[in-house]
Image (spheres, rainbow, N blue to C red):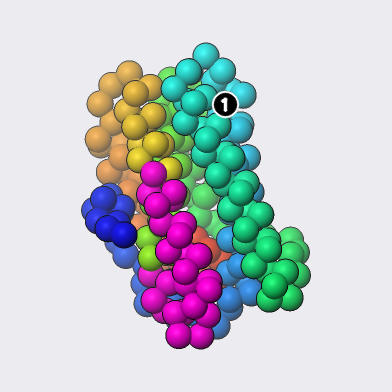
Amino acid sequence: MDISPVTDFLHCRTPQAWLDAALENQDILLIDHARCEKKAASTALSLMFKFPERENLLHKLSRLAREELRHFEQVFDLMRERNVEYRHLSASRYAAKMREPVKLGDEKTLPDVLIIGAYIEARSCERFAALAPAIESHDPMLAKYYRFLLKSESRHFLDYLSLAREYAKEPIDERITFFGELEAELINAPDDVFRFHSGVPA
């Protein structure tokens, strides 16, 4: 699948050091992947409850939430097949740092949150695309699953981005660039923990 719209949107590719760490921490990768799918569904549902008057948001995010929960179930099944126990993992700094610049209660809050959602989904898509060939030789089933996820993740990124443009009251290109630069900084900066969206292992 061509993911050039995703890679064109992002300001950097996943560093090789993160991919190397992923190959050495596949259990953590699966556990955190499952957690991310749950969180993605939760975020979509939360926005639906906060903005019930936004018809297009309800339409797109209800579908997204269903897909994310289905992905959680699929990853959970893969974990059970591999005897990987689902357990609590602390979240990486990634999402929290992305949301730090957002001013709650401001008219820009919703567009900002939607832009951040677009970057999270785009990064997920880019990482699945990078992971698939890296694990192909020793886990072809998981590589196939990561490729399967590319289509939905790329669509989710576009849905979030189109919603951000729809509900913004002014042009948001500069804001998109701002969050893109922040996202790239987090991806390239040393990170104390390994997670699906973490930076370069310290």
Q: Is residue 83 magenta?
A: no
Q: Amino acid at mark 1?
A: Met
Mark 1, residue position: 48
Relative to 140, does residue 88 appear above or below in the rendering?
A: above
Furthest toward the bottom, the residue is 138
Quadrant for residue 20, please give it.
bottom left
* Residue 201 visible in the snapshot: no
Q: Percent x, y for residue 166? A: 34, 23
Nearer-the-camera pick, 47 or 172: 47
Q: Residue at x 62, y 61 (%)?
A: 75
* Residue 172 visible in the snapshot: yes
Q: Classify mark 1: residues with Cα within 10 Å, few (<14), some (14-19) or many (20+).
A: many
Q: Is residue 145 magenta?
A: yes
Q: Percent x, y for residue 76? A: 68, 61
Relative to 197, does residue 152 appear above or below in the rendering?
A: above
Q: Residue at x 55, y 44 (%)?
A: 67
Nearer-the-camera pick, 186 or 114: 114
Quadrant for residue 150, please give it.
bottom left
Element marked by disc 1? helix
Q: Which residues fall within the magenta stretch?
A: 130-155
Nearer-the-camera pick, 14 or 132: 132
Q: Residue at x 64, y 67 (%)?
A: 78
Q: Percent x, y for residue 192? A: 55, 70
Relative to 88, does residue 16 appear above or below in the rendering?
A: below
Task: Look at the image and tell me in which quarter the N terminus lies.
Answer: bottom left
Nearer-the-camera pick, 15 or 41: 41
